[in-house]
Amino acid sequence: MRKSRVLLAIFAASFIGIMSNPEMLTASDSVAVLGLSNDNIVETVVKAEPVVADVGEEIDEPTEPVEAIVQEVVYSEPVYEEPVYVEPAHEEPVYQLPSSYIQINGLTIPLEYTDTTAENAGNAQLAWYYKTGKHIYGHNLDYVFGSLDWAHDGGYLDGMPFTVVMDGVASYYTVATHRVYDRLDAYTLGYNGDTLSMYPIVNAKLDGTYYRMTIMTCYNGSSQRLVLYAN
């Protein structure tokens, strides 16, 4: 009987302590927290406000040293590449014949049409094809008709073949004879004391005989004219 009263008194005293101080944790305040999920837990970070000092106020330096982050620069040696020399391909120049030309004594000389006997090609490699179709003339330059003077002096002018191409049409000739005239003026020639105009020359006529073609160039400088008569 006495033990029962003692136990009842202890229980009553414990109950009165819990009721009078509910914030005090006791064995009865334990809560089971097993099985909670951490997926939706949010971490709150509180940023420290910068400390601004009033004029004349000292700011305490941080007690812990701040470690500086140094980024190391890695030097890479540039890669040198030997330039590759590619030799350009050699292309032979393509020679194209003019549409009109004369081939004589190993030379190919361009021809141009004219209706006068007073054309001057200057230093060009060029000869003139007269409108009658029976007369060609040009300078006695080495690369034009100069070799005809040498052939005359060498004695092998007569019998020389040549080809005349006009607008793609070729005609073939052989020198039958030749004559050297004195130049009196631009339109008059002399031979053995006789004078004659250019008319028989441009029509390939000599001493009453007609030929198919004549070629005329300077001779003995420019004081004379060498004329070839060809069939």
Image (cartoon, helix red, strand yellow):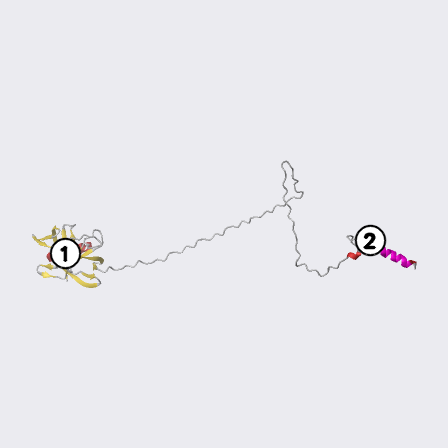
**Which quarter of the figure has residue 157?**
bottom left
Q: Quadrant of the N terminus?
A: bottom right
Q: Main SS type for the magenta part?
A: helix
Q: Position of residue 65 (x, y in %)?
A: 65, 44
CA neighbours of label 2 inside 10 A, class few (<14), some (14 to 19), many (20+): few
Residue lying farthest to the top in this orientation:
56
Pick whichever of labels 2 and 1 is earlier in the sequence: 2
Residue interval drawn in magenta: 3-13
Q: Residue at x 89, y 57 (%)?
A: 6
Judging by the rendered image, the residue that carries numbered circle 1 is 227
Instruction: Please tell me whether residue 12 belongs to the stretch shown in magenta.
Output: yes
Q: Is residue 78 left or right of residue 26?
A: left
CA neighbours of label 1 inside 10 A, class few (<14), some (14 to 19), many (20+): many
Q: Hey, what amino acid is under mark 1?
A: Val
Q: Position of residue 4 (x, y in %)?
A: 90, 59
Q: Is residue 33 left or right of residue 197?
A: right
Instruction: Please tell me whether residue 122 belongs to the stretch shown in magenta.
Output: no
Q: Which mark is residue 17?
A: 2
Q: Residue at x 91, y 58 (%)?
A: 3
Q: Is residue 142 left or right of residue 72?
A: left
93 and 153: which one is in front? 93
Q: Hey, what amino acid is under mark 2?
A: Gly
178 and 205: which one is in front? 205
Instruction: Give the CA distance from mark 2 to mark 1.
Output: 156 Å
Q: Quadrant of the C terminus?
A: bottom left
Q: Position of residue 42 (x, y in %)?
A: 65, 55
**Which quarter of the figure has residue 52?**
top right
